[in-house]
Image (spheres, rainbow, N blue to C red):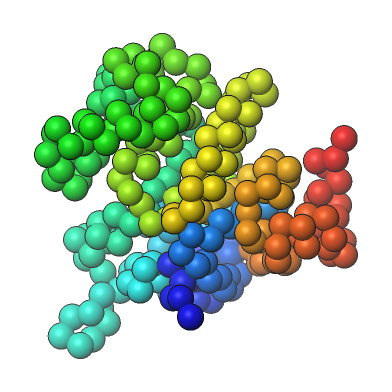
Amino acid sequence: MTEPIVTFQNIHKSFGDVEVLKGINLDIKPAEKVAIIGPSGSGKTTIIRLLMTLEKPTSGDIIVDGKNLWKMDKNGKLVDANEKHLRQVRGDIGMVFQHFNLFPHMTILENCMTAPIHVKSEDKKTAKQRSIEMLEKVGLGDKLDNYPSQLSGGQKQRVAMARALVMRPKVMLFDEVTSALDPELVGEVLEVIRDIAKEGEMAMILVTHEMDFALDVADKVLFLDEGVIAEQGTASEVIEHSKNERLQSFLKRFRA
Ligand SMILES: Nc1ncnc2c1ncn2[C@@H]1O[C@H](COP(=O)(O)OP(=O)(O)OP(=O)(O)O)[C@@H](O)[C@H]1O
Ligand SMILES: [Mg+2]
């Protein structure tokens, strides 16, 4: 049995009095592609933010590649994780945001090189070479010296992808990465994600409203509803064959 790369064990998350996640249990295998669908406010982004350590669970454990995200071993006892431990675990996780979050004052090549150099202490030459490789992979090999402001939304999103890939994460998180794009730019970004997904080795968690894309790419689909996983299975089971009424009425919105 392969060990999961990501595990959520009975994760609860509240903001003030409002419980947003109500006991999430989840195992993601290395290389597994998991799509999360669900209505606005159901907690999808919160799951992603917990994995990025941008939020801390109210209770429960998150394990990434065998390491507990928020706890570490100290002389045989589990204690609260320190910043160094968090940084280490976070190193296995890459993310692409809805709004790109590129550095505007850096060229796209510099955008990709900066984290390997400053976070992973990679030498500049290697970082540059690998960044060029990744930018070529996302189809931007001819834009290395452009600034983000000179690119289309779809191109910016592809830079964001290259920048995450250059860190060689074991898990990549995508939170509605096409929802801020003009419709005609969505396809090129999904195409790149599809290519990365087919390459294999990395696990991916994709929050998406693109049902055809989920059907094509995802090994597993989770339907999140009011902070619980209300349905899960293969993409076809969940998107095409589920009897769950709330899921069906949610999916209706995406059918022409
Ligand atoms: N920092 C916060 N403080 C207070 N409430 C929050 C915070 N972050 C999220 N919430 C609330 O938690 C709930 C779930 O939010 P979340 O962003 O995870 O939903 P979502 O499923 O990603 O929705 P959408 O599809 O609109 O992006 C919402 O009711 C939201 O208002
Ligand atoms: Mg969201």
- The answer to whether residue 246 is left or right of residue 10 is right
How many numbered dots are placed on residues in this image?
A: 0
Residue 40 on image: x %, y %: 68, 47
* Residue for point 67% across, 43% down: 213
Residue 112 on image: x %, y %: 30, 32
* Residue for point 77% across, 57% down: 236
Residue 157 on image: x %, y %: 48, 29
Residue 50 on image: x %, y %: 45, 58
Toward the top, the furthest residue is: 150
Residue 4 visible in this rendered orientation of the protein: yes
Toward the front, the furthest residue is: 199
* Residue for point 73% across, 45% down: 211
Which of the 4 image quarters holds residue 67?
bottom left
- The answer to whether residue 227 is left or right of residue 85 is right
Q: Nearer the viewer, residue 126 or 250?
A: 126
Vertical side of 234 occupied by 59: above or below: below
Q: Nearer the viewer, residue 241 or 125?
A: 125
Residue 59 visible in this rendered orientation of the protein: no
Which of the 4 image quarters holds residue 100?
top left
Q: Nearer the viewer, residue 151 or 134?
A: 134
- The answer to whether residue 143 is left or right of residue 198 is left
* Residue for point 58% across, 57% down: 34
Q: Nearer the viewer, residue 249 or 14?
A: 249
Q: Is the C terminus in the top left, top right, bottom left or bottom right quadrant?
A: top right
